[in-house]
Image: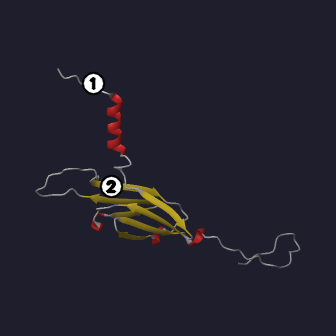
Amino acid sequence: MLLRTTDPFRDLDRLTQQLLGTTNRPAVMPMDAWREGDRFVIEFDLPGVSPDSIDLDVERNVLTVRAERVARNGDWEALASERPRGAFSRQLVLGDNLDLDRIEAAYADGVLRLVVPVAEKAKPRKIEIAQGGSSRSGEPAELTA
């Protein structure tokens, strides 16, 4: 007689790993982001992904990255399969202080690198103070830039 017990917590852990991924097998594409002066840099790890399958879209202030790692075709037998396959997608909400019309993208060594410059209107700037006499009516003098 074979005794088999069910463990609902183990089943829940297995389902969670399949949906959300683990550190060894992420369900989404891993990303790093940082600021370098007047630009933001975002890198996505996409090893084994063909550059032709990568798609970048910007709509308003939402950046969408899509990529696909296709399954192998042919006469072969899988011995281990730990790398996720299929379509991946990730969306980032970018701030209004970024220039989304000038995003630069490059793909090398399995890493997609995006460089997003800070918009000119968001950069700090000095405002010149005009010097002049005050008006007689008590209103401030007209300023010119």
Assign the N terminus to one quadrant of the image.
top left
Q: Classify residue 23 as left or right of residue 116.
A: left
Q: Pointer 1: what residue?
A: 5
Residue positioned 35% across, 49% down in the render: 24
**Picture coordinates of residue 105 (x, y %)?**
40, 70
Vertical placement of 29 versus 113: above or below? above
Q: The residue tagged with tag 2: helix, strand or loop? A: strand
Circle 2 Cα neighbour tier, 10 Å, few/some/many (<14 / 14–19 / ≥20): some
Residue positioned 34% across, 42% down in the render: 17
Vertical placement of 126 versus 49: above or below? below
Residue positioned 28% across, 58% down in the render: 68
Assign the C terminus to one quadrant of the image.
bottom right
Q: Pointer 2: what residue?
A: 88
Q: Classify residue 9 as left or right of residue 86.
A: right
Q: The residue tagged with tag 1: helix, strand or loop? A: loop
Vertical placement of 79 versus 56: above or below? above
